[in-house]
Image: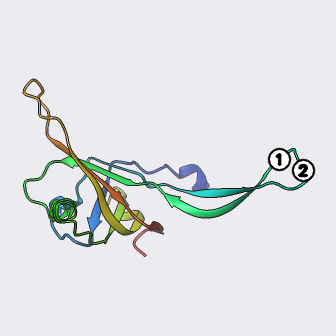
């Protein structure tokens, strides 16, 4: 019998969806790309008297990158209405969202639970009569943190 570690293959990164707490629309889960699922520590340096070879670096707080979502532009979208509320009316209503990486059966492999997201930037690709390309909208969000969940649990 083969060892389970030798049979493991990393998951593909193309089968996923993004579920927003503010939308139940099927089209609002489909995105061409998702980036910004990263976390890092900020550090404070502490210089010790008489020790000139190094500085002590102490972790202070975590810092999360902005989440960037890209998709073909939708004519109607609850998510875009949420963005427009923020940009047009200055109504910032935080929303939670889940980025769900799925296996070949459509079951969750990994879930990034993004907390307290708010719109930061909305961009529409260039309109060019010489190109034969779809219009892509880019949604950028700031958020407080994410938690990681394995599977459906």
Which mark, by number, is residue 51? 2
Q: Is residue 116 above or below residue 139?
A: below
Residue behind mark 1: 54
| Image position, residue 42 (x, y; %) | 60, 57
Q: Quadrant of residue 92?
A: bottom left
| Image position, residue 115 (x, y; %) | 39, 70
Mark 2 Cα-neighbour bin, 10 Å: few <14, some 14–19, many ≥20? few
**If the image is split into quadrants, where does the N terminus sit?**
bottom right
Q: Quadrant of residue 153?
A: bottom left
Q: Nearer the viewer, residue 152 or 115?
A: 115
Tags 2 and 1 touching, CB below 8 Å: yes
Q: Residue at x 58, y 49 (%)?
A: 6
Q: Nearer the viewer, residue 35 or 118?
A: 118
- Asked if residue 40 lies left or right of residue 97, the reply is right
Mark 1 Cα-neighbour bin, 10 Å: few <14, some 14–19, many ≥20? few
User: Marks 2 and 1, Cα distance to the nearest angstrom?
Assistant: 7 Å
Which mark, by number, is residue 122? none
| Image position, residue 102 (x, y; %) | 35, 59
Q: Residue furthest front?
A: 49
| Image position, residue 12 (x, y; %) | 40, 48
Q: Is residue 18 above or below residue 51?
A: below
Q: Residue at x 37, y 58 (%)?
A: 101
């Amino acid at each position: 019998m083969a060892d389970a570690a030798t049979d493991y293959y990393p998951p593909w990164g193309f089968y996923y969806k993004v579920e927003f707490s503010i939308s139940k629309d099927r089209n609002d889960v489909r995105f061409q790309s998702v980036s910004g699922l990263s976390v890092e520590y900020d550090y404070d340096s502490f210089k010790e008297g008489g020790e000139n070879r190094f500085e002590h670096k102490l972790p202070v707080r975590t810092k999360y990158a902005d989440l960037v979502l890209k998709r073909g532009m939708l004519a109607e979208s609850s998510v875009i209405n949420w963005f427009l509320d923020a940009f047009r009316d200055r109504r910032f209503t935080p929303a939670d969202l889940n980025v769900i990486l799925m296996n070949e059966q459509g079951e969750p492999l990994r879930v990034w639970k993004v907390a307290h997201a708010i719109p930061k930037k909305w961009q529409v690709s260039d309109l060019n009569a010489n190109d034969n390309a779809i219009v892509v909208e880019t949604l950028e969000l700031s958020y407080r943190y994410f938690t990681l969940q394995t599977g459906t649990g």
